[in-house]
Image (cartoon, rainbow, N blue to C red):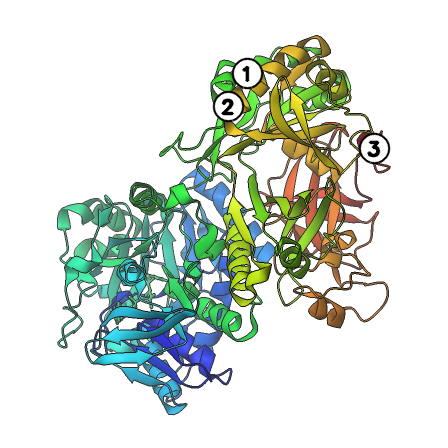
Amino acid sequence: TQHVVIIGAGIVGTNLADELVSRGWKNITVVEQGPLHMPGGSTSHAPGLVFQVNASKTMTQLARYTVEKFKSLEKDGQNCFNQLGGLEVATTPERLEELKRKHGYASSWGIEARLITAEECFEKYPLLNKELVLGGLHIPNDGLALAARATQLLIERTSKAGVRYLGLTPVTGIEQGDRGVTGVITANGMIPADIVISCAGFWGVEVGAMIGLTIPLVPLAHQYAKTTSVPALAGRSVNSLQNGMNASMPILRHQDQDLYYREHGDQYGIGYYGHRPMPVNAASLGVTSKDVDEKNMPSRLDFTWEDFEPAWEETKRLLPVLQDCEISDGFNGVFSFTPDGGPIVGQAPHLNGFYVAEAVWVTHSAGVARAVAEVLTTGSSQIDITECDLSRFEEVQLTQTYISETSQQNFVEVYDIIHPLQPKESPRNLRTSPFYARQRELGAYFLEVGGWEIPYWYESNAELVKYLPAAWQPVKRDTWAARYYSPIAAAEAWKMRNAVAMYDMASFHRFQVTGPGAVQLLQRLCTSDVTAKPGSIIYTLLLNNNGGIRSDIFVARLADSLFQIGANSTTDLAYLTSEAARQSQQNPSQWVQARDITGSTCCIGLWGPRSRDVINEVSADDFSNKGLPYFSVKRVTIAGVPVTAMRKSYIGELGWELHASAEYGQHLWAALWKAGHPHGLIAAGRSAFNSLRLEKGYRIWGTDIRTEHDPYEAGVGSAITADKKEDYVGKAALQRRYQDAVPSPSRRLRCLTVEDRRSVLLGKEPIFHKNKAVGYVTSAGFGYTIGKPIAYGWLPSDVQQGEAVEIEYFGRRIKARVTVEPLYDSQMRRLYD
Ligand code: FAD
């Protein structure tokens, strides 16, 4: 069996050892630089509050499993979770609204939660200042994780099962061979390993550096303080490992002031995120001594009282009983922050067998550990962890400047109310397309995605709103749905459907797959047959070995051994490159290479019923149905520059994606713009685009569909070539799942329209059927062509087309109906003719 070495015996490393050993893996060694009874990392002082509900389904699921596991982790009749419930209070109207949204997430992800009045908050938490609180969200299954105790119980349990623990043993290097990792180097010698998982917490950066791997996290100090004993809690004792049990009120969050609270026997614990970011260099903390104790550990820095003062004043206002207390003990505790707030999990792109699981809260620890164990033992995890994947960061997001700035900003915003479309304020303008200068002239409103500046609409189209036919007039939106939105999008959609528009597609991921083994690689990874002759385009899926959709891609065959891939993310690139490298190594005559060409190329989507009039003015090539049929590709010349034209459209109109080398971009834009003028051409932004693609029913991977879904549930079964002879990843699993000729999944991605014709949803809202939460919205928007808001969402299959459902939005129920899809041009006439 394989030798596994886990670096770090914090809550993540010990849970991982446990998850692996319980799956039958042997030969596991956990190497820890600190003493095992108290390793001295973030876990050793973590107060362990577990608030499960998160806007992210993944994070909520990871937390739910952690709660279940800690509840079952028992010794001497006591487990490791005190299910006191969680209470989040609102002291501002904005927070009260945010809690309503959060209640929606809870229902969507299946966590019991209740919005409660100020009076009920006070009943559940009598120490609150009634004057301040406007209402709250109560989550009965939240509570306190006894993280330090859990770590010790896990060490005990896994040691009995054969896991070897080496305390006071810093890892100083990683050994590598031709095929990947071969061992870890410690002061006491080399430990052989086939698989190494770094669970080094905020030391992850240092361990990553041992193999030249950038780990995008920043260790930051976060203040935590305990009060002197509180008269109202008098008489309670505290036992350090079990101190979470001596509490009676829910764990409490006061996010308007960046504060959270728990009880420690007769004392209060106060956590504060309102202070300045305090970055720490883990390497500067030195070697963990063997004399770690509660007051002396590397992750515990001196308290800076001046940073805490506002928190203490606010705390005495919220909890007036503390007015007679003082702070008895405080510290600046170190843990990891990342550019997007998510954990960092996955395999190093360039070193086989080396994995990381870092920047993980106690809240998600067991969930992450289980997911990693599943990936190692079966190849994929039941909870989709793509959003945690190490490979999710774009190259520009891995510079030290970016990591440092955005991770610190993430600390600042950790409790803020963030709109789903809210862009970063900084850094901006890192990636701009060749059309950027023209877009600015046209008054583009930019949002940032993956470092790119993306135009959402153009002020130059504002005039058009006046001319919109009555049926196209946009509805007035509530203040939340009106953020990062302009009615100009309606005018842009109208033009796209009735004349012609051009759209900047430069930021869409484009890869090239080349080499004699290109066909073999794609045949092995894709659900469709990609062997069609050069000039064809195929929409296909990449599955994981569980039959779940790991991505959906477009494969354009440019030549026998040259493919251009339209993909979703850098994670797709990491997958294709690592699979290509593996194949090339195993079979050199079938070598193949996948590379990113996104930045070196650009793309304009030219779409609309009059797009052919425009293109014919600037190109002598044949753009007729015969010359370039739907879903085909060819090299053309447009206004004197070489272009790869692909006949396809994400918005459901006649037109092409025009791909060119980046240096031709400005010229291409200018030529199309000039030629298009007489035909009513406009530039349109992503806001209109999102609406038009919803009308057309095109799914977005990561939002509508994820690895937890299979192609039939997701409504993309047509991307599977039924008689494909070659085996491909996920084929067997899918066949096992559906033995019948006509797959009948138990849940489906459905299209819904909103009955009141005006409530625009934003995604993630729960869907109720017969008064029971049975599903959730994935993406939503206003369908300008059909004059109604649209939502896509997951529902059990027995909720049939035509049935009425309700969607919860800000605590209100909105009527919607499951409809036949697509809502626009189901005959595909606009695309084919
Ligand atoms: P750690 O516990 O830091 O473990 C990593 C281990 O790796 C360490 O023991 C370290 O010694 C070892 N190691 C590192 N490098 C090496 C090496 N080269 N060789 C050998 N060993 C090595 N989370 C919550 O969910 N809820 C909360 O309420 C909460 N409150 C917090 C309050 C404070 C003040 C702080 C600081 C954090 C809080 N957190 C909370 C976050 C949480 O504590 C951490 O995210 C979590 O403990 C991280 O666990 P870990 O196992 O990844 O890291």
Residue highlighted by disc 3? 832
Q: Quadrant of residue 229 in the image?
A: bottom left
Residue at 70% from the left image edge and 51% from the top image edge: 540
Q: How far apart are marks 3 and 2 (CA)?
A: 32 Å
Query: Which residue, given by chain and number where applicable, does mark 1 sit on?
Result: 459
Residue 445's disc number: 2
Q: Is mark 1 on a helix, strand or loop?
A: helix
Ligand 1 under 8 Å from disc 3 Cβ = no
Residue type at mark 2 is: Tyr
- Residue 122 appears in the picture as rendered: yes
**Residue plotted at (78% across, 44% down):** 817
Amino acid type at image mark 3: Tyr
Displayed-image quarter of ligand 1? bottom left
On screen, residue 494 versus residue 333, left or right, reads right
Please say if the residues under marks 1 and 2 sit with CB atoms less than 8 Å apart: yes
Secondary element at tag 2:
strand
- As displayed, is residue 10 above or below residue 159? above
Q: Give whichever of 52, 592 is nearer the camera.
A: 592
The image position of residue 351, as x and y in percent, is: 41, 63
N-terminal-most mark, 3 or 1: 1
* Residue 373 percent coordinates (x, y): 48, 73
